[in-house]
Amino acid sequence: MKQTLFTGAAVLALSTGMAMAEQLTVFGPWLGPDQENVEAVLAVFAEQSGHDVRYVGSDSFEQQIVVDLEAGSAANVAAFPQPGLASDMAARGFLTPLGQDVADWVSENYAAGPSWVALGTYTGPDGSEAFYGFPYKNDVKSLVWYIPENFEDAGYEIPQSMEELKALSEQIVADGGTPWCIGLGSGAATGWPATDWVEDLMLRTQPPEVYDQWVSNEMPFNDERVVAAIEEFGWFARNDAFVSGGAGAVATTDFRDSPKGLFSSPPQCYMHRMASFIPAFFPEGTAVGEDVDFFYFPAYADKDLGTPVLGAGTTWAITNDSPAAHELIAFLETPLAHETWMARKGFLTPHTGVNPDAFGDPTLRKMNEILLSATTFRFDGSDLMPGAVGAGSFWTGMVDYTGGKDAQAVADEIQASWDAIK
């Protein structure tokens, strides 16, 4: 109750402009253009509140925030790219609960609101759960990229279900084409694009609760439901006729090079499943929405699982408690906090109260429609797993699988790696 009243008072202070001025520090992962974007948002808050707001960015956020918290010198608010790290810090008593009223607001005002509340709810040092993490600035991964002109020339329609997507893949092969470009190469991180595929397919074959059990290892990695999702990925990636260069090229093709087949003439592939950032690796001068476009990686029509969306983003938490920190969280509830960044670049939001006309980029507006249409949102599963698994054996296991190894054997090995660190 004390926390609820405190947050309510912060909202009142923000709205009346009568809060006592404080210095407020915010720590996040953004540098360069994104630093300018977040500073533009914080400048609006500073003007409204009268606080002296200062942002510090770091490309070593994950390491530095732990050092700062352990030293007692953390910023007031931190934007965590990994909810798992925020959860760890909450368990150690380093985060301040935001209050049930903030959780209720997220549930009521974000598309798939309960999913976002669950994402920011962690166990505190006393063993009780509370809402610690406010989701702000998100990304969508459930996207399939294609060339509209190629689809039009071939007479293909945008698939509205997974059944239609599979039928389209088969039709492209029957017509003498190759449906997919897939590449897992990423230097030391080779394999991660396949984890995104498997996570998306878990959300399309199992209820979100099962996805959560898998990510936390409450359900073992080698459960038959996980193995089935891996084999669903194999339906696309382990078929020589389905993949540009054949199945043997999947693991060795760099993910940054893999979409290039879309742009060749004749096309080396017609579709490429990848997150919202991939246009950075398209040929120079490519206009998204004209030369290339995207559609939602669809759900199965015969499974009652709604329209799940896989994504990522940042979770904002109070790491050094102060009244101004709660005011900033209250400000993040306002449409203005979202629309300020929407007018710039690189921002998506599930906030249902924003004006979509605020988007300065029509591509982002279209991506945001996918986010707003989600019935379930889940964070990238590999980012939530222990590093030895999510950024280790899961990556390498997917490379082994695309190379021909049995899905059950791969899942058994990944589970064994998880058992080894418990």
Image (spheres, rainbow, N blue to C red):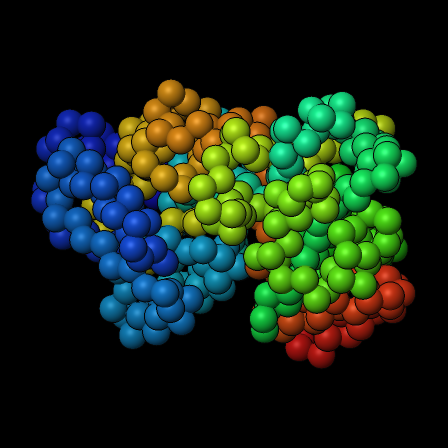
- 109 or 143, which is in the foreground? 143
Using the rendered image of the protein, determine whether residue 109 is visible from the camera's viewpoint. no
Using the rendered image of the protein, determine whether residue 236 is visible from the camera's viewpoint. yes
Q: In the drawing, does residue 61 fall left or right of residue 264?
A: left
Name the quarter where the C terminus is drawn: bottom right
Please identify the residue farthest to the bottom as the structure is shown. 420
Q: In the drawing, does residue 11 fall left or right of residue 23?
A: right
Name the quarter where the N terminus is drawn: top left
User: Residue 388: image x %, image y %?
Assistant: 63, 73
What residue do we see at 59% from left, 73% from top? 188
User: Residue 44: image x %, image y %?
Assistant: 20, 36
- 122 or 24, which is in the foreground? 24
228 up-or-down from 309: above or below: below
When asked about the image quadrant of residue 13, the answer is: top left
252 up-or-down from 133: above or below: below
What residue do we see at 13% from left, 36% from top? 47
User: Residue 299: image x %, image y %?
Assistant: 74, 33
Q: In the drawing, does residue 326 fall left or right of residue 228?
A: left
What residue do we see at 51% from left, 47% from top? 283
